[in-house]
Amino acid sequence: MKVELRRVNEAFHFEAVGTAGVPVHIDGSPDIGGENAGARPMEMILMGLGGCSAIDIVLILQKQRQVIEDMSISIEGERVPNETPSVFKNIHVHYNFKGDLNEDKVKRAIELSMEKYCSVTAILNKTAVITHSFSIN
C-alpha cells in the first residue's frame, strides 16, 4: 500500500492520493493557519475506522442475505488533553441502518468487525476504548 501527498498551498493544505487514484484533501485548523480546505488528519483516522468497519459489516450482512436500504455512521472521538501527541482515549461509533434487517445479525456483524476484522480498530484499541451502538429505522 502506498499513498502520496502533494502540497497545494503555502499553508497546510495537501492532496493525498492512494492506489485508486482518488484525491483526498487534508488541511490544518484555522488556529494554526489552515484554511478548512480538507479534513484534519485525526478526523481522517476516525473516517478510516468508520470506512473499515462499514465495509466489514456490509459484507457480513450481504452474506447473510440481509437487505440494507441505507446505512450511516456517526463517530465521536475524545483525545487526551494537554499531551503531545494527543491520541484518542475514547471513541464511540454509532451505526444507523435502514432496511429489512434482523437485529441479532446486525449486532453480530458489528461485533465481528470491531473485534476481529477491522484493522483500524485493532490499531486504535492500543490507545483508546472503543464502544459502539446501533439503531435500525
Image (cartoon, grey):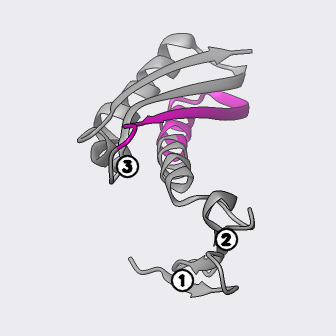
Q: How crowded is mark 2: few (under 14 residues within 10 Å), some or many (20 or more)?
A: some
Between 111 and 39, the one lying in front of the other is 39
Question: Dividing the picture into quarters, in which one does residue 101 lie?
Answer: top right
What range of the chain is rendered magenta?
Answer: 54-82
Q: Residue at x 54, y 32 (%)?
A: 61
Q: Residue at x 60, y 27 (%)?
A: 95
Q: Is residue 22 left or right of residue 112?
A: right
Between 86 and 39, the one lying in front of the other is 86
The quadrant the C terminus occupies is: top right
The quadrant the N terminus occupies is: bottom left
**Which label is found at residue 25?**
2
Q: Are marks 3 and 1 in contact (CB under 8 Å)?
A: no
Mark 3 vs 1, N-terminal side: 1
Q: Dot 3 corresponds to which residue? A: 120
**Which label is found at residue 5?**
1
Is disc 1 placed on a helix, strand or loop? strand
> The residue under label 3 is which amino acid type?
Val
Question: Dividing the picture into quarters, in which one does residue 30 lie?
Answer: bottom right
> The residue under label 2 is which amino acid type?
His
Note whether 84 is above or below 98 in the view shown.
below
> Percent from the top left, x then y, of residue 86?
37, 47
